[in-house]
Each structure stands twice: as structure tokens, then as C-alpha cells.
Amino acid sequence: MLYQRSSALFDEAYKYIPGGVNSPVRAFKGVGGVPVFMKSAKGAYLTDADDRTYIDYINSWGPAILGHTHPDVLEAVQKQAEKGFSFGTPTELETEIAKLIVKNVPNIDQIRMVSSGTEACMSAVRLARGYTGRNKIIKFEGCYHGHSDSFLIKAGSGAATFGNPNSPGVTAGTAKDTLLARYNDFEQVKDIFRNNEGEIAAVIIEPVAGNMGCVLPENNFLQKLRTVCDEYGTLLIFDEVMTGFRLAFGGAQEVFNVKADLVTYGKVIGGGMPVGAFAGRNEIMDALAPKGAVYQAGTLSGNPLAMRAGLTTLELIKGNLNFFENISKTTETLDFEIGKILNEKGIQHRINRKGSMMSVFFHISSVSNFDEAANANHALFNNFFHQLLANGIYLPPSGYETWFISDAIKQNEIDRTLEVIRKFEYS
Ligand code: PLP
């Protein structure tokens, strides 16, 4: 029987951990069935508790862009661990990683490290509010910026998968300061600005959305947001937790040539360790404590093990001139070949892709916003997911998620993936 030990482990976990997991989407509630418990990961592969291996298209939800347990990162972390796990003091290492990032990412002068993408986005919004003296923010339906209160309003990712994008526990007082707009609907954004003049501190956006499946900005949407933010004195926050160091070293700012006022990071920046960060120009970042009055802190912020994993990962990416071209090419091949197979089977679909992010939506011809993502055939995605899983291909367990392609996925893995998809039985 498949997943035998995972089933037993899930039953046991269920008794002690809410829903058996420490982050909801891991529970497979969206796709049904029992979550697969993994015990190790190397390169392109995960190994589960039953000793089955899988080609991994989640890559820890993005961080493992080099593939899992890259030998150089492993060695660097091991050496760092011998020096101590956490000091609660500044370290030279923190300046080293900050310098590498600031020198190679456009439009940022300073960066503050935190321990998750949620913290990064939450802190960036506080800073934007403190800096502008305004309360409201605009966020887009289907975008996910972590689980902080202001963001759990029509949120994507697990919140969308489980049908509770507006979480109980978020007060009406908090919710009223989050104004919602449709992704790619610039006219609606303009209306919101007109109706809330002088009140909007920031617009926060995933410059390529990954939490309603992969959805791309269209018709110069990001450039238009820049212009309207300038017009109204509002800060533009790019949530690059997924796109940072993935679409390019300089993330979406570099790829789309649009300047954000604040940028948030997570995932790749920590090389698999718990790291997030937010960054911006001097004049804005200077408003943060201890220099400025906007408070933000963290016991484990800039943790040396996490910084070493992040720094080594970023150096490896930076040192490989063709890195982004290669992973984009792999993703393009997957997009093209999967599309061909689905066409041959007569399955209507839409594949959205940018760089090494992609999603397959079934029974819909275009997906530009959350409503369209929701209208895709998720039951068919779930069927697709389970057939692939049973054959050793590990996709994100929800049609509202993005596949993350790592540099460890090579021709062998592509061939094996396509072979399994060719056998997909569509009923
Ligand atoms: N922002 C985006 C775009 C994300 O995709 C995520 C997580 O998936 C977050 C923020 C929150 O990051 P974390 O899960 O590290 O708190």
C-alpha cells in the first residue's frame, strides 16, 4: 500500500498538532488524501517515510532553488554550526549578506533581516504606515503576504484552498484598513485611490502572483501602479518572497524594470533556513528602530546559521552566470511539453509561467486574477495531482499554488515527469 507509514504518522501527529500539520496547506485538505511525510531530500528528490522517492516541484515552497541539500550549502552550515547557533549580537556575517544583496538588487540601500516572509510583509506595512502617517493599504484578491491580520482578507494560498480567505480572529477594525482590488484591474485601483485620497499608506502586491496559482501582471500593471502611487504619495511594496532571487537576482524589480519603495523577501534568501527580509531606500529604512521610531525586532533575526545558508545560496546563484536562464529554460520545456501532452489528450488547460514559476489550470483558457483561478477545474487538478504523486512526481497539493522549478531538475527528471503525465487518465 502507498503511503502506509505516512498514514500512521499522520494519525499520530493529528493527536498532538492541530490538523496534524504546522502549516495548513501541508495537510492535503485541498486535494484530499493523506499528506506524505518526508524524511530526507537531496537534489531534485524527496524521500518519504515509506522510502519512496519523488521528483520535487515544490522545493519547500520555493527556497530550495538549487535543489535540496546542496553540498556547498551543507558544508558552510556545518562549519558555521561549530561556531555556535545563535549569539543575539551583531555579526560580520549579517553585513556580508546585506552588502551582497544591496549591491546587486536595484533600488534598495538597506535591508533588515527577519525570520519569515510573514514578518517581512507585516513589518514593511508597519514601516509604510509609520513613514507616511496613513493607515490604509491596498492588497489584491488572491495575493498572500503571510498570515498577519491585515493580509488575511481575500488571501490566497492555503487560505484560498480551504475556502476561508477571511479568517475569524481578524477584527473588523483591522479589516477596514485593508482595501481590496482585483489583480490586473487598474481601473479599480484608480477608483480606490480616488475614494480614499490622502489615506493610503501602501499598495502591496506579489509582482508575479504565486498564491492563486501563478498569475502574471498584464498590460503594464506594475508600471501603472508605480505611477498612481507616485501621484498619491503612496508607497509601492513588492512582495518578492517568491520572486526575489528567483526571477532574477534583482527579482521582479529587475525583470519588469519597476522601482518599488519597499521590497519583502523570504524563501530563497534563507537557502532553506527560516529567513525573511525587507528592504528599501535610506530615507524610508531610516525610520526603523533603533534609528527611527517605527519599532521592529526579533530574537533570532540574522541568526548565523540562517545567514550562512542564505549567503552561500545567494553566492552560488550569483556565481553561475547562466543560472536564471537555465532554470527558466527547464520551466519553458516543461510548459511546452506538458501543454502538448494535454492537447493530445483533448484536455483544455492554461499554463501560466514566469521564469521558474508555473501553474497548470484546467478547463479554462486564461487566468489573470483570482476569480478566474477559482473558475479553473480544481477537481481535475486534484485527480492530476494524485496520479502524479502515486508515480513519484510531487506537485504542490492545490491548484492555487505555483510549481517551483529548481536547478537540480535536469533532462532525466523532465523525461520521467512527462512519461508519467503521458499516462494521466482523464475521466
Ligand atoms: N509572501 C508571499 C508572496 C508568500 O508566498 C509567502 C508564503 O508563501 C509569504 C509572504 C509568507 O511567508 P512565510 O510563509 O515565510 O511567513
Image (cartoon, helix red, strand yellow):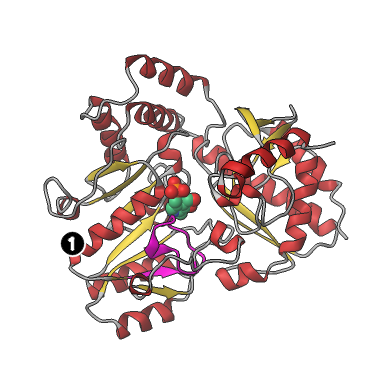
Residue 287, placed above or below residue 177: above
- Quadrant holding the N terminus: top right
Give the amino acid type for the residue marked by disc 1 in the picture: Tyr
Query: Which one is nearer the viewer's eye here, 226 or 311?
Result: 311
Q: Is residue 110 left or right of residue 346?
A: left
Q: Hey, which quadrant is residue 68 in on the image?
A: top right
Question: SS for tag 1?
Answer: helix
Q: Hey, which quadrant is residue 139 in on the image?
A: bottom left
Q: Position of residue 246 (x, y in %)?
A: 47, 44
Instruction: Note whether residue 393 is visible.
Output: yes
Residue underneath mark 1: 131
Residue drawn at (32%, 42%), measured in percent from left and top?
Answer: 114
Q: Is residue 243 magenta?
A: no
Magenta range is: 137-154
Residue 26, placed above or below residue 8: below
Q: Position of residue 270 (x, y in %)?
A: 41, 36
Q: Is residue 321 left or right of residue 300?
A: right
Q: Is residue 151 magenta?
A: yes
Residue 213, placed above or below residue 323: below
Residue drawn at (73%, 58%), measured in percent from left and top?
Answer: 381
Residue 382, placed above or below residue 410: below
Q: Mark 1 packing: few (<14 Cα in 10 Å), some, or many (20+)?
A: many
Q: What secondary structure is the magenta-colored segment mainly?
A: loop
- Quadrant holding the C terminus: bottom right
Q: Position of residue 67 (x, y in %)?
A: 57, 32
Query: Which one is nearer the viewer's eye here, 100 or 270?
Result: 270
Instruction: Note whether residue 242 is visible.
Output: no
**Mark 1 within 8 Å of ligand 1, using the beta carbon:** no
Numbered marks: total: 1
Q: Is residue 143 left or right of residue 193?
A: right
Q: Position of residue 115 (x, y in %)?
A: 36, 41
Residue drawn at (31%, 63%), measured in percent from left and top?
Answer: 236
